[in-house]
Amino acid sequence: MFGIPGKQAVSITDKAAAQIAKLMQKDGHQGLRIGVKKGGCAGMEYTMDYVTDVDPLDEVVEQDGARVMIAPMAQMFLFGTEIDYEVSLLESGFKFRNPNVVDACGCGESIKFDESLGAKS
């Protein structure tokens, strides 16, 4: 929908691909759908949900056995994002390196996009 021919909407690191593939094996999931929703102190939050059926309107990115679907409303906000998976002593989880984010809250859970993308907080 908002893609550039020959370029995937998001990139997935090897660590993230391994974790997504592992999660897909649970209960026969077809992948993970990522999106954004209004919320948090900066205005928007990322969402991740297991997918049992692929929506034909989703942008699908596949790598090394991992499948990520991008919800149609989120495609313009996530284009160019790198999805990583990090593990530390205190926490582990997916990290989004998104060039479209102009501000984030202190905890990193809430983000703000450039208003020209249509995400007004």
Image (cartoon, grey):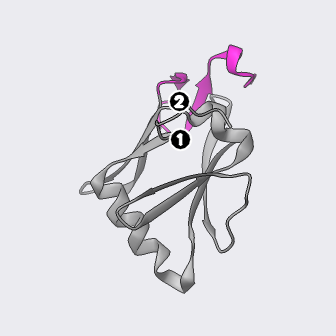
Query: Which of 9/84 is in front?
Result: 9
The residue carrying mark 1 is 109
**The C terminus lies in which quarter of the figure?**
top right
The residue at the point 62 percent across, 23 percent down is: 113
Q: Can residue 91 be seen in this view?
A: no
108 over 55 or under it: above or below: above
Q: Type of residue at label 2?
A: Cys
Q: What element carries label 1?
A: loop
Quarter of the image that includes the N terminus: top right
How far apart are labels 2 and 1 at the CA level? 7 Å
Task: Tell me residue 101's x, y (percent).
Answer: 53, 25
Left or right for 80, reference 18: right
67 inside magenta stretch: no
Circle count: 2
Identify the element where label 2 is drawn.
Answer: loop
Is residue 21 shown to the viewer in this render? yes
In magenta stretch: residue 108 = yes
Residue range of the region highlighted in magenta in the rendering: 99-121
Q: Which residue lies furthest to the front in this view?
A: 5
> Where's residue 42, x and y in %?
62, 28
Q: Which of 84 and 61 is in front in this view?
A: 61
Q: What residue type is labelled 1?
A: Glu
Q: In this view, does 91 lie above or below 65?
A: above
Q: Residue 47, relative to residue 116: is it above or below? A: below
Residue placed under numbered mark 2 in the picture: 105
Q: Which residue is drawn at 74% across and 40% down?
A: 73
| Residue 63 in picture, x, y percent from top left | 39, 58
CB under 8 Å between callouts 2 and 1?
yes
Residue 105 spot, x, y in % from top left: 53, 29
